[in-house]
């Protein structure tokens, strides 16, 4: 069983509207603006479902921002409605080397235990052969390494960017 059949990567956040014709300023996270394929859609979640938007206009601004206009966002009010929204892209639209075992997209996600308690934030992925692990930074700023095994994963919430796992005792202080 492969848990991650369709992976959406959080690539940007809508910072604010720009102008009166639906333009927005996006801040990119984890990728550079030039790495986005502007021929492919990006997605913004509404009511738990990813809604696709295509770029009508895209101008890089600085190192990690862009001014963009998305199809269907035509007015200042439309742009204000998506301000603050996370922007996702289908992982298949990127040229990542994918052997089926790269879970680095989980970086930045929140790790929850079986009871839903926040254990920390995923700070990295260790691709150890036959034993992939997540690096975790706890609320107390400690670091821990958790094996990323399918039997330990209880729930994946892509919209909330949370992974709930059974964490073996003693791994997180």
Image: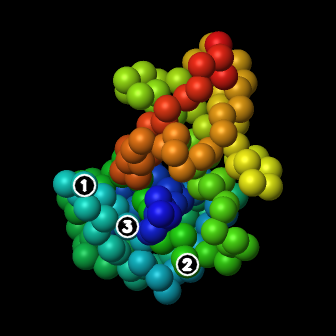
Crowding around mark 1 (Cα neighbors within 10 Å: few <14, some 14 to 19, many 20+) is few
- Residue 48, which numbered label? 1
Q: Nearer the viewer, residue 95 or 77?
A: 95
| Residue at 63% in and 55% down | 103
Q: Earlier in the sequence, mark 2 or mark 3?
A: 3
Q: Nearer the viewer, mark 3 or mark 1?
A: 1
Quadrant where the C terminus sits is: top right
Nearest the eye: 97 or 88 = 97
Q: Which residue is mark 3?
A: 43
Q: Foreground residue, 142 or 61?
A: 142
- Residue 84 placement (x, y as % from top left): 37, 47
Q: Give the CA distance from mark 2 to mark 3.
A: 12 Å
The front one of 130 and 48 is 130
Label 2 element class:
helix
Residue at label 2? Answer: 93
Of the residues under marks 2 and 1, which one precedes in the sequence? 1
Q: Residue at x 44, y 68 (%)?
A: 6
């Amino acid at each position: 069983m492969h848990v991650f059949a369709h992976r959406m990567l959080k690539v940007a956040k809508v910072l604010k509207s720009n102008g009166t014709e639906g333009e927005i300023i996006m801040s990119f996270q984890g990728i550079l603006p030039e790495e986005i394929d502007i021929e492919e859609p990006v997605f913004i979640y509404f009511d738990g479902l990813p809604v696709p938007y295509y770029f009508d206009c895209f101008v890089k601004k600085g190192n990690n921002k862009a001014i963009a206009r998305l199809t269907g966002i035509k007015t200042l009010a439309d742009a204000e409605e998506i301000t603050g929204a996370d922007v996702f892209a289908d992982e298949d639209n990127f040229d990542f080397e994918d052997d089926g075992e790269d879970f680095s997209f989980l970086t930045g996600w929140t790790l929850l235990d079986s009871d839903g308690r926040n254990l920390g934030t995923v700070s990295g992925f260790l691709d150890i052969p036959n034993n992939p692990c997540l690096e975790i930074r706890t609320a107390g700023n400690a670091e821990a390494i958790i094996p990323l095994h399918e039997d330990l994963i209880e729930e994946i919430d892509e919209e909330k960017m949370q992974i709930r796992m059974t964490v073996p005792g003693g791994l997180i202080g």
